[in-house]
Image: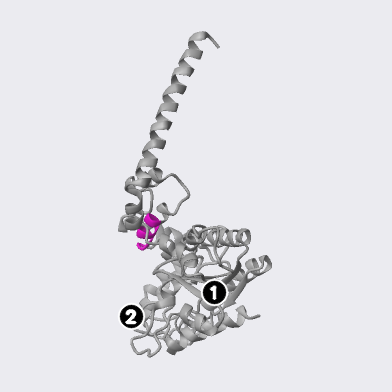
Amino acid sequence: MTENDQHIILKLGKKFLLLATILVMLDILYRVTLYPRDRERYCTLMQYAQIPVKDSTDIIYLGESSNHSYSPADKDQRAISDMIDDMLPGHKVARLSKDACHAGIYYDILRNIPRKNPVQTVIVTVNMRSFSSEWIYSDLEKPLQKEQIFMRKAPALYKRMLLAFKAYAHWTESERTKLVREGFKKQTLDLPYYFPYKNANDWDHAIGSQCYLYNGKKVSQDTIALTCHYIKDFAYQLDDKNPRIQDLDKIVKLCQRRGWNLIFNVLADNMDQIKVLAGPDLEFLMKSNVQYLIHRYEPQGVKVVNNQYMVRDRDFFEREFPTEHYNQHGRHMVAEHIVERLKE
């Protein structure tokens, strides 16, 4: 290396060091001035990570709208987490629930809980719809991913730059629809018997282009639309490539490192209605996917509470779209089942 080359490298090194120093100073300035305001404005999720410490809770319940939704006819409007709290005297249960949340969001909340905390048990809601491309590419992902940026372990200024440059899901509706459809096509179905459809897209198209159910029964277009929703939400087979499975894996490892007992609360879906509308093939897939979760996670020390058939059709108060929103009886059934497993 010539003397001139050494001079050039030294000069570049000094410039790089100066640039790095400026960036560090800007990050410090941003962190002590505008960052607290921006985090409060753009990241409501961060407050959930502080609740276990502020409220001295030993059990935390992470969920989405299933936890706090209730029927207008309910006299008891308590959330599932509140019911669990009432069933466990001597313990305190914290509710960390926000609409449209899924395993990826729960992981970010959990890893931001301060190291010194009283948490002993973590209950993570597992909504089976969240594994489908319909939810993975939901239009509700945009605001959630914006919040996730601020939950990263990274310099404050870098996170603000990611937000400014829209380093999160910000598809147009046509782009989102294309991603969902491509996801359906990739979710190939391999049943242990003859089945005429190779993926959710083909199945959805076949049912949606006629006015008959799987058994030949003629029904209204509204019923066909609901049937197709069930197919799009649940016609998949789980494997370790699914991003939600990868998120659950990260939660398991995090809880093991933190010494937290972990429970996966598999939510009930309207299996009564699904059997009538979509038939035994979709029921088979759904049962197989829950068994996949049980066989994957229970050997790792996770309690998987299977509520799949726990809530009956009469306890679902929304009828035009698949949801996990139960009346007071349904919420009580789920809470009671979780408490039974907790006490084992």
Indicate the quadrant containing the N terminus: top left, top right, bottom left or bottom right. top right
Residue 140 shown in magenta: yes
Mark 2 surroundings: few (<14), some (14-19) or many (≥20) residues within 10 A: few
Which circle's residue, 1 or 2, is located before the other in the chain? Answer: 2
Residue 222 circle label:
2
- State which region is magenta: 139-147
One can see residue 323 in this view: no
Q: Is residue 249 above or below residue 291?
A: above
Amino acid at circle 2: Asp
Q: Secondary structure at mark 1?
A: strand
Residue 18 in picture, x, y percent from top left: 41, 27
Amino acid at circle 1: Asn
Q: Is residue 73 above or below residue 164?
A: below
Residue 143 circle label:
none
Residue 305 in picture, x, y percent from top left: 58, 76
Which of 207/339 is in front? 339
Residue 336 shown in magenta: no
Q: Main secondary structure of the magenta part?
A: helix
Read off the residue under disc 1: 265
Mark 1 surroundings: few (<14), some (14-19) or many (≥20) residues within 10 A: many
C-alpha distance separating marks 1 and 2: 31 Å
Residue at (49%, 67%) from the top-left corner? 52
Which of 221/287 is in front? 287
Relative to 160, is 343 on the left or the right? right
Which of 225/112 is in front? 112
Q: Nearer the viewer, mark 1 or mark 2?
A: 1
One can see residue 266 in this view: yes
Q: Secondary structure at mark 2?
A: helix
Residue 42 in picture, x, y percent from top left: 34, 56
